[in-house]
Amino acid sequence: MAAGQYRSAYEQSLQDPEGFWLEAARAVHWTKPPGSALDDGDAPLFRWFPDGELNTCFNALDRHVEAGRGEQAALEYDSAMLGVRKTYTYSRLLDEVARFAGVLRSQGVGKGDRVVIYMPMIPEAVIAMLATARLGAVHSVVFGGFAPAELAARIEDATPAVVVAASGGIEPSRRVEYLPAVAEALGLSDHEVTSVIVKSRDGFAAAAADYGGQWLDWDEQMAGAEPAAPVPVAATDPLYILYTSGTTGSPKGVVRDNGGYAVALTWSMKNIYDVGPGEVMWTASDVGWVVGHSYIVYAPLLAGATTVLYEGKPVGTPDAGAFWRVIQDHRVKALFTAPTALRAIRKTDPEAAELAKYDISSLRTLFSAGERLDVDTYEWAGRILGVPVVDNWWQTETGWPICANPRGLEPLPPKAGSPTFPVPGYDLQILDGLGEPVPAGTEGNIVLKLPLPPGTLQTLWNNDARYISSYLSAFDGYYATGDSGYRDEDGYIFVMGRTDDIINVAGHRLSTGAIEQVLAQHPAVAECAVIGLADALKGQRAAGFVVLKAGAQVQENELVKELVALVRRRIGPVADFKQATVVEALPKTRSGKILRKTMRQIADGEEYVVPSTIEDASVVDELVPVLRQAGQRG
Ligand code: COA
Ligand code: AMP
């Protein structure tokens, strides 16, 4: 185990969490400082800083302007899609956020009301998030790659007063019109919103005016807007809801608080990411994901740093040098991206010849998360960039890293394939299925002893029961991460994969159960299984195996096209579902459970053991060649 700063911070955080986090809370501006750290009166639900009051937007913006840093860049918008760049100083961002908060207020949005944001990577998305936070309201950002039905499910659950949208997003191959999707989602949902506010972008067919009086134009509203002051809220009040895939078709609304999140993110910027005031962090994700919420928007701004908002891809916009160009142009100190983006660059430019065109001397560290950082990619990135490559493991639910190499606190010797050690605040243990600790080197369920540190989820929106049954019931006194892994003899953690039906496609979290629900809606499909197959570029890809209804008259290639279109239509292009195969039967246990894990192991060419509970072993024998072929199609 490592000695020194890390070890003593980690031990203190577990032995005296109250002392540790009250000390960290001093870095945040409170309208009423917290007198105590943890409220455990409602265990297993916990609240941090129960008597503290603050405004998260004030901490992200006003505070830095008041400290005299108004002219420093807060946000650098860099659109590789449009070839446009725009700098927002802290003063300018504050002005726009305060005025948009005024617009939301004029639509009746107040403390605790929800605002759904469906926008691409444009500054207005960040402005809408911060403006919502300024009013003490609660945002829920929905990623643009989701289809109307997914947007509708989130509107239905979050019951927002207002939806904020843009007229569209730009993908390399096409322009994605957002407004028809918003209109369809509102039609699918029973919930009525007060208004839809639309940021109009050039080159899109639809505009707010096409949809009637409830639909308002962003620019027109901003022209006459009165700035709104920050509204202090309880530290325990929600800042946002972020929906993420569960194992069923209905997404889980992860609830994040204000106070704990501000404290944890501020701590993480200094101690993990080593980025401070005036320094530049670029997180190449999307504001629709947790990585975007935490490390594009809130954390860099809470720290008084500059954040880069990049609208583009790692390759093809225009080439595999795009990331290096952004590092050079914005003097990026810390780049945070997903392994799939690095693999995409490597595939196009294996020797990183593009790098020679740029000066990336500002770069100190490459952070990677979203999926397991494979050893090949880790070594390649370290070799071409010549800086430490730091894997960090976490999830939408936790909001900030569970395991990382704390570069600011104490850089620890890295180990390929490992996100290093548990971060202070997380009491990480590895348990077998019966809840007993496993020895070093043995894989088991990665769990976190309750209470979780500040910044992690409080509960699921309007659904404490689902929070408890999904996360807190499997191992008494622990939060189950849903990941399996092991701790090696030196204490390094290795995260190996999910224990449930969640898969990770290009760093995007998807539920195979949700895709199965869509396939099952096809009239020719009797039953189906969706599994995540290993994919050299995207980590995993979803593949469907369907059994036809007796007498169904369909051509397999036509059916596959229809199934692909159905998933795209119901879940969205983000599912990236392209592969389906008709099979005679699916392997099942005698109790009817489909053996998805065995199917995946066969397809990926791994060793497999057919469980003794199998109903009919000959089904597996017949499937082996089909699965092997499916596995090789990547
Ligand atoms: N709005 C609408 N559609 C979107 C979208 C958005 N915001 N984001 C992606 N899509 C679409 C894409 O256009 C694509 O559609 P297509 O099937 O018509 O081509 C589909 O969803 C799949 O997209 P993607 O998974 O991004 O695949 P890709 O082949 O276009 O790009 C990568 C591959 C690796 C370059 C890309 O996935 C990438 O940059 N990944 C990094 C992901 C990331 O940062 N994740 C955050 C986790 S921290
Ligand atoms: P999301 O909630 O979308 O961030 O996805 C979280 C899940 O992605 C985790 O539970 C892991 O399965 C996986 N994941 C994210 N980061 C890593 C990482 N650094 N190493 C391994 N798996 C990761």
Image: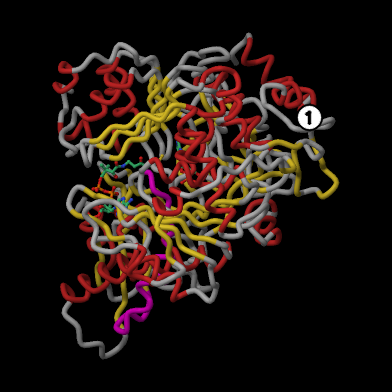
Q: Return the x and y of residue 206 as percentages of the image width and height.
A: 28, 64
Q: Is residue 74 above or below residue 84?
A: above
* Amino acid identity at mark 1: Pro
Closer to the camera in the image, 612 or 475: 475
Give the residue displayed 17% in from the left and 52% down from the top. Answer: 173
The stretch of residues the image draws in magenta is 507-527
Q: Position of residue 53 (x, y in %)?
A: 75, 37
Q: Among all residues in the image, which is located at the extreme bottom?
A: 551
- The residue located at (70%, 44%) in the rendering is 478
- The residue sitting at 33% across, 45% down in the picture is 506
Q: Is residue 550 above or below residue 202?
A: below
In this picture, residue 223 sits left or right of residue 349: right
Query: Which of these two is toward me, 139 or 441?
Result: 139
User: Measuring 31% from the left and 62% from the top, which residue is drawn there?
Assistant: 207
- One can see residue 597 in this view: no
Question: Does residue 489 show up?
Answer: yes
Any magenta on residue 514?
A: yes
- In this figure, which residue is indicated by the disc labeled 1? 33
Which quadrant does the N terminus fall into? top right
User: Quarter of the image holding residue 303?
Assistant: top right
Instruction: Tell me residue 134's x, y (percent).
Output: 60, 42
Q: Is residue 539 left or right of residue 238?
A: left
Residue 237 rendering spot, x and y as whole percentages: 70, 47
Residue at disc 1, secondary structure: loop
- Counting every numbered tag in the picture gives 1
42 and 426: which is toward the camera: 42
Which residue appears farthest toward the top when viewing the image? 4
